[in-house]
Amino acid sequence: MSSSYAFSNPEGMYFVTFSTVEWVDTLSRRIYKDIIVDSMNYCIHEKGLLIHGWVIMTNHVHMIISRDGSFSFGEIMRDFKKHTSNKIIKEIEANPQESRKRWMLWLFKSAGEKNSRNTNFQFWQQDNHPEELFSNKFMDQKLNYIHMNPVRAGIVEEPHHYLYSSARDYADIPGLVKISFIE
């Protein structure tokens, strides 16, 4: 992958996207999205992650992030994805209401077996596709893109109506994740 998709500036602000393997709509259930929210908040409090914007869709997550601490972007993202992957897989295994359990576990196991970096399952695709936000115009564009995702997907009519997004915070409605506002 080209260097334009790398965390090359440790002091930068980045737009990141990460997706489930095969774009499986695993994150359509609230219980799985809540695992991601909890992990975001953990990384904010324990790893110095600053989240300026975010949305959790059914098969991918977008965030605008920077950092304030000793952990690198790579370390934060690695730990975040590993933790959420393990917890979501365990929750799928334990969820008696999960109608797609066998299919999803088979898919995540098959992907894990093809990747030497994994021991068992692979939930997230490998890359984060980080793009450094180098101007206010680019930041605003990406924040708007994040907040409009649920509207474009037909989930809500207004961005701030979607619970799993920072659009609520930007509309002065308390959200689920502590936001570091873009000024």
Image (spheres, rainbow, N blue to C red):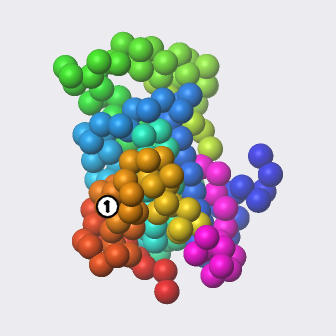
Residue appearing at x 53%, y 68% in the figure: 144
Q: Where does residue 166 sit, x and y in percent of width and height?
A: 38, 66
- Identify the residue shown where x is 30% and y is 37%: 29
How crowded pointer 1 is (Cα within 10 Å; few <14, some 14-19, many 20+) is rated as some
Q: Quadrant of residue 41?
A: bottom left
Indicate left or right for 151 with 13 as reference.
left
- Residue range in magenta is 128-141
Q: Is residue 17 magenta?
A: no
Residue 14 left/right relative to 25: right
Rendered location of residue 37, percent (x, y): 32, 53
Q: At x 60% / y 74%, what residue is drawn?
A: 139
Disc 1 residue type (three-letter): His
Q: Element under label 1?
A: helix
Judging by the rendered image, the residue that carries numbered circle 1 is 161
Residue 74, given in percent of the width and then of the height, sits at 57, 55
Q: Residue at x 39, y 57 (%)?
A: 157
